[in-house]
Each structure stands twice: as structure tokens, then as C-alpha cells.
Amino acid sequence: MAHWIAFFAVLLAGFFIEILRGRRFRRWLFVSFVAAVFLAGTVLADYYWQTYDTEVWSGTVSSVDHKEEWDEYHPETTTCTKDSSGEESCTTHEAYWEHHDAKNYIYTTDGGEIKVDNPYENGRSFDDDYPNSDAELAQFFPIGSPSASVHHYVNRVKASYSIFKNKDIDLDLYPDLPAYPDVVYGYTDIPRIVGDVPNKQAAEAYLNQANSLLNKQVDDPDNPGKTRSWKEVNLIFVNLGADKPREYGLALQDKWENGNKNDFIVSFSMDSGGRFQWVYAFSWSETDILKLEVQDLMMGMGPVTDFNDVIYPVAGKVADLFVRKQFADFNYLQIDPSGWAVAVIWVLEMGLILIHAWLAFRRKARVRAAAGGFFLGG
């Protein structure tokens, strides 16, 4: 409401300024238009900022494409022009060769086309000499290997998460909570095991495979002839540390704002012997039975020496029970302009009133000065 007050203040103030001083209503219309642009632009930018979010998709490398380097010959050209007097002048550009570097692309079921270089840290960069074929490129990105990518979506819940948060959790008391895992490494890899677990390196590779399988392409019943991701899920495991209370899981839920729309997040505490002290699963999915069964499954395990033994049965539960929440269900949430947006609108609109008044009074002062000079001269 406050942003509308600022806008209508410009309209009313401008109208009275023109009545009192200039009656140049075309100027008032222009100022009103600028005020509307300020209002709409700030509100839209704020809405984008409040609802901008990303989610992680999983898939596989479907193909690779190596384009060899090549040289393009540009023949000699002559360009002639005439000046206003009809005299002609010509410029000749000599023939030359232009080199085009080799290019390498991969295609994934989740991220589409990706231009790539060597994915290995400190590895030799791709150049005209290597790779020289699709087969050589596929040695770096094997067909069918897991892939992951980050995609933007509109998240209205992000702007209104306060109505969903755990009321008894103060995030200031949990400063050591980890960041959400959405950093892409080597073009196709997003590690989704946060914290230490037994046999972590192998477990991360296995979880990537599990996520790719859970998101394999299947026929889309709503769009015949097209495919879609099967479960549309992003499975994440988070070890919050030994001897941490269960409230850490609730705090992580609030820090990550219950995850993104396709996430299924399993937080837990594991002691030095590999036993789960507690497990807390959260997701926007409304299949609560899945969260309970995963928690019971993991709590019933003995000491874990290989985290693959955890991923396999949990991924199976997700495959059987996970149903992604349709975020269109949250369209009822009203997104009001944030405090900073309202402040910006007020500054812009009040500045516009001052400029409008200055222009009107300046013109009136000029008219008076001209009239006063005429009478004094008489």
C-alpha cells in the first residue's frame, strides 16, 4: 500500500502544481508516466529478486560434438563511394585467411548443449591438437555418464517462507550450518553429499548415478511424442556432525527454506562409529510417509562402513514414493514489495515531485522577471 501512496502523491501533487503555476497538463501527463515507470520498474525488479531461485536437475550425457579447427579464406574486396560532388573514391581490402579454433560441445538430458574445455583440474586445456574426434572427446565425457545442472525457476514461497518456518528455531544459534550444494564442477558434477561419510568419494559417484536414474527420461503423458524427467527429484544427504542435536536438522530446513521444489533432503548426525544418532528428512513433497520410512530405515541400520549401503535403499524408497510438489499450488501467495523496494519508490517519486515543482516555479519566475523588466523600463 505504501508504494501506491507514493505514486498517487506524485499524481495529486503534480496536478495541483500545474493548476497553481503553469497549467501545462501535458507536462503533468509526462511526469505521471515517469512515475508509473518508476513504480512498475521497481516492483517488477523486486518481484524478480524475491522469487528468483534455482534448482538442480540430473540426467546423463547423451552425445558429444567435436568441431575441427578450420581456416576461412576472405578474397580481396574493393569498396567505392561517391561524395556530394560526384567524385569517386575506392578502398581495397587485401585477401586474408581467418583461423577458427576447434570447438567442443556435450549434450545432456538435463542441461542441453554445453561448450566444454578440459574438465580436470590443472589438466591441459583443449586446443586444435586435442581432442580431434568425438571419440576422443567422449573419453572425458562418456556417453551415459551422470550429469547435473542448475536451472532458474520462479519460487513464490521464497518471498513468504516466514509462514512455513519452524517457530522455535533461531538460526543465529546455528552459525555452522552448511551452504546448499549447487556448485557445478567439471561441467557436469554437483556433489550432493554434504559433510563426511564413510567411503565418501565412491558414495558421491554412486549418488550421482542414483540421481540420474531417478531422473531418467520417460514418455510425457501430457505431451505425446515428448519426454520428461521420471521422478523430478534431487536427492541430497547432509551429515551435520557427531553429537549435534536434532534441532540442527530443523535449523537446516529453515536455512535452506525447505529446499527447492524438487529436493528430497536427508539430514542426520552420525557418531564416530558410523551409527545414526538421528535422521530428519524434509522436502516440499507431500508424501510424508516417504520421509518417515527413510528416517526409520536409516535409524534401523547398524554401523555404516560404506555410505553406498545407505544410498541404495533410500534411493529405492524415493523411486517408489516421491511425488514432486507442484509449485503452482502456491500461486495464492501474495508477494508484496519488500521494504527496500518501497523505500526506493518513495525516493524516486518524491524526487520526481521536487523536479516537477522546480520546473513549474522556474518557468513562473522567468515570466515574472520578464514582466517586471518591461514595466520598469516604461
Image (cartoon, rainbow, N blue to C red):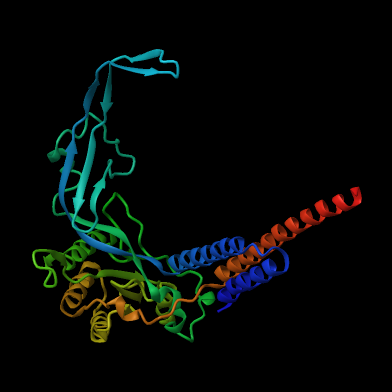
Whether residue 107 is situated above or below residue 23 in the rendered picture: above
How many discs appear?
0
Residue 206 visible in this rendered orientation of the protein: yes
Tell me what residue is drawn at x 21 percent, y 29 percent. Answer: 69
Residue in front for this viewpoint, 341 or 54: 341
> Residue 154, located in which quarter of the rendered image?
bottom left
Horizontal and vertical percent for residue 198? 29, 65
The N terminus sits in image quarter? bottom right
Horizontal and vertical percent for residue 351? 66, 62
> Residue 356, located in which quarter of the rendered image?
bottom right
Position of residue 293 in the picture relative to residue 197 (left or right): left
Residue in front for this viewpoint, 326 or 61: 326
Horizontal and vertical percent for residue 47? 45, 69
> Residue 329, located in which quarter of the rendered image?
bottom left
Position of residue 244 in the picture relative to residue 350 (left or right): left
Residue 244 visible in this rendered orientation of the protein: no
Horizontal and vertical percent for residue 112? 22, 53
Whether residue 181 is situated above or below residue 256 in the rendered picture: above
Position of residue 341 in the picture relative to residue 310 (left or right): right
Whether residue 132 is situated above or below residue 79 in the rendered picture: below
Residue in front for this viewpoint, 273 or 182: 182
